[in-house]
Image (spheres, rainbow, N blue to C red):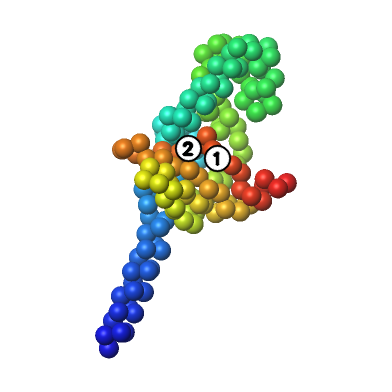
Amino acid sequence: MLSKKVTCFLIVVLLISVVGCTNHPASDSVKAFSIALQDSAWTNAWNMLTPETQIAWDSTAVILHQFGYVESSSVLESLNSPVTEEEFLVLDGEMLFERMVSSAPEISNLSKSVRSVELADSVTALVTIATSTGNQIIPVKFDGVNWLIDLTTLAPPPEIQSE
């Protein structure tokens, strides 16, 4: 009788730990980010990114400015993010982010199906989501208050990388 209770207890603990894997605040952040993008809430999505990710977008805008409007406009067009010369003059990382994600057709089909959450360390979680092309690992970092999406090391799912 005692062994059945211990076995039941272990099964319950195992089930709670498996279910708990996807109910981590980092997975909530990934889901909220996906919802913000799908709802065209660009500023909300931008605010869910790590400072490092925002700096990378800002740096890209700075580089575009260094090349100037004429040379950069063809690059922006190829990214489905054409801008007028007036818009280019005030282009920053957030605007570049908004223009690129708003023109990406896959934004409306982002997965919120969390498969697992693996804690790489005390401030980094790797959230695995299911996509139509395979699993996608989203790095998420804790800033002391919030879990923020880190796009600086994001890689496409393995199935897309091999194409």
Q: Secondary structure at mark 2?
A: loop
- Farthest residue, direction bottom: 1
- Pointers 1 and 2 in contact (CB under 8 A)? yes
Q: Residue at x 59, y 17 (%)?
A: 63
Say what amino acid the circle numbered 2 marks: Asp
Q: Secondary structure at mark 1?
A: loop
Q: Which residue is mark 1?
A: 154
Label 1 CA crowd tier, 10 Å (few <14, some 14–19, many 20+): few
Percent of width and height locating residue 130 = 55, 54
Alpha-carbon distance for marks 1 and 2?
7 Å
Label 2 CA crowd tier, 10 Å (few <14, some 14–19, many 20+): many
Q: Which one is nearer the viewer's eye here, 48 or 62?
A: 62
Percent of width and height locating residue 18 = 41, 63
Q: Residue at x 27, y 88 (%)?
A: 1
Q: With respect to residue 85, does 97 lie above or below?
A: below
Q: Quadrant of residue 155?
A: top right
